[in-house]
Image: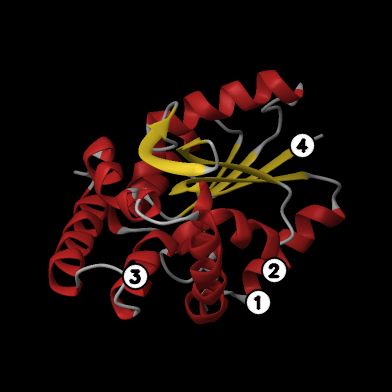
Amino acid sequence: MTLAIFDLDNTLLAGDSDHAWGEFLVEESIVDADEYQKANDKFYQEYLNGELDILHYLSFALQPLARHEMKQLLTWRKEFVEKKIRPMMQASATELLDSHRAQGHTLLIITATNRFVTEPVAELLGIEHLIATEPELVNGRYTGEVAGVPSFQDGKVTRLHDWLESTGESLDGAWFYSDSHNDAPLLRKVENPVAVDPDPTLESIAKENGWKIMSLRG
């Protein structure tokens, strides 16, 4: 099966689910508003700049999961999806996914955002396969630590190769769609790299390499 691989934030979604989760926590007074908002915005800017220390960020981002029971987290997540994720959904992204389905391709999301946040988003998009950063879960409760390699930059390549080995899939003829220069390592690994509403750095890389550039935002 040919793989059609998609970044999630600012690619399939018209926004960043990880940053939006932080905004939701602030708006619902689940975290200290001023302190958390400043840190959330700072980490997001570092991500955009290609300067993010992913482990430092995750030590911040996963703490709210560790502080609360799973039942409460799932209740909040359901509200988050309705308030924050549905407004980010794009009809053009659905059409792109459907075009790959019509060709019999296997659809896969690969994202640096953690699985707790992204799993329901993948379900909304009808995509069965998801590679995400894994928050450590012990006895039904999050620890605030990361399990395994974060799915970020070169880590996406590592995690994808692990997934390929476990599933028997291959990168022959594969597509990968992303908006971010942080995904350049994986874009270079596929036969059909596509820059989607790319940031300026990725746009330059795409032009230099003759990659397709497209927009899902019109």
Few, some or many C-alpha atoms within 10 Å of disc 3 (few <14, some 14-19, many ≥20)? some
Q: CA distance from mark 1 to mark 4?
A: 23 Å
| Label 3 or label 2, whichever comes before in sequence order | 3
CA–CA distance in space, label 3 to label 2: 28 Å
39 over 172 or under it: above or below: below
Disc 4: which residue: 2
Which is nearer the eye, 209 or 17?
Answer: 17
From this viewpoint, is residue 164 visible? Answer: yes
Secondary structure category for the residue under label 1? helix
Q: Residue at x 71, y 27 (%)?
A: 172
Gap in angstroms between the C-alphas marked 3 and 4 = 38 Å
Quick one: SS at disc 4?
loop
Within 10 Å of disc 2 (Cα), the crowding (few <14, some 14-19, many 20+) is some
Residue 214 shows up from this direction: no
Say whether residue 34 is left or right of residue 176.
Answer: left
Whether tag 3 and tag 2 are in contact, CB under 8 A, the answer is no
Q: Residue at x 46, y 59 (%)?
A: 9
Name the residue type under label 1.
Answer: Ala
Mark 2, residue position: 94
Q: Which circle, 3 or 2, is nearer the viewer?
A: 3
Residue beneath disc 1: 91
Within 10 Å of disc 4 (Cα), the crowding (few <14, some 14-19, many 20+) is some
